Amino acid sequence: MARKRDFKAEYQRRIANAAKRGLSRSQARGHARAAETPLRPAPVKGDDRLEDALKLLRQTGNQGRAAREAGVSAERFRRFLRSNSLAERRGRQWHISDNRTRRMTVITEGEAREFTLRDFAQASLNGQHLAAVKAFLSTNEVSWLAKFAGQSVIDAKGKAHPLETDPNALYRFAHAGSEEFHEIYRLNL
């Protein structure tokens, strides 16, 4: 037969142990007040739906709508953003501060190389370059590459890699039979 628990005594022990550690009664109960630090903040681990919600938040700026469309609760998404320092609230707007590194293929010096890029801005610039190269190869219009002339992406070590804009080098690269260069970039978690 199962032993009967004395919940009242357990609660009193928890309150007494918390008082010894200098915690308030509300912290000991596990429901810290707004000004108090929580007893054990559990970090929210990311998954595909939370990453999709972050992508939607970038596009819409609306945290509730992004969470709903991605299929996660708004509270879980908000906890994910705050615990991983991916965004912060300033007034009535969310400001994205996602500085995680990303592993991407970069077309530089006539060949494709894998680099770990420093942050979202670098990955976004490289993604735009890859899309422009794809558009250039399908339409043969050099104007797609014009905005990337002289631009570089910076890897996680701080080294700059110039983006390839030479049409002949891109044609050689495309016809060399190498792997697909316009793959989706991966986060390094």
Image (tube, rainbow, N blue to C red):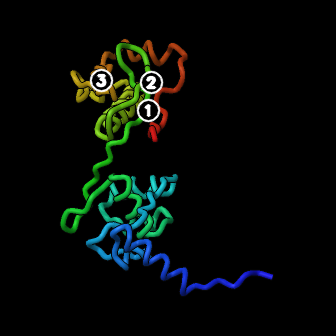
- Residue 41: where, in percent of width, then height? 41, 62
Mark 2 crowdedness (10 Å alpha carbons): few <14, some 14-19, many ≥20? few
Q: For numbered disc 3, what is the local secondary structure? A: helix
**Residue placed under numbered mark 2 in the picture:** 114
Q: Which of pointers 2 and 1 lies earlier in the amino acid sequence? A: 1
Pick whichever, 73 or 37, lies toward us.
37
The residue that mark 1 highlights is 103
User: Label 3 is placed on what type of residue?
Assistant: Val
Q: Quadrant of residue 93?
A: bottom left
Relative horizontal placement of residue 130, taking residue 142 as reference (left or right): right
Q: To which quarter of the image does residue 92 belong?
A: bottom left
**Are the residues flagged by discs 1 and 3 in contact, CB closer than 8 Å?**
no
C-alpha gap between disc 3 and disc 2: 25 Å
Residue 154: % across, % down: 29, 27
Q: Which quadrant is home to the N terminus?
A: bottom right
Category of crowding for the residue at label 3, using alpha-carbon neighbours closer than 10 angstroms: few (below 14), some (14–19), many (at least 20):
some
Pointers 2 and 1 in contact (C-beta within 8 Å): yes
Give the percent coordinates (x, y) of residue 150: 21, 21
Residue drawn at the location 39% of the way across and 22% of the way down: 107
Q: How many labels, in total?
A: 3
The amino acid marked with disc number 1 is Arg
Q: Earlier in the sequence, mark 1 or mark 3?
A: 1
- Residue lying at the far left of the rendered structure: 91
Q: Quadrant of residue 56?
A: bottom left
Residue 142 shows which numbered tag?
3
Q: Nearer the viewer, residue 157 or 161?
A: 157
Judged by depth in the image, the label closer to the viewer, 3 or 2, is 2
User: Which label's residue is closer to the chain start, 3 or 2?
Assistant: 2
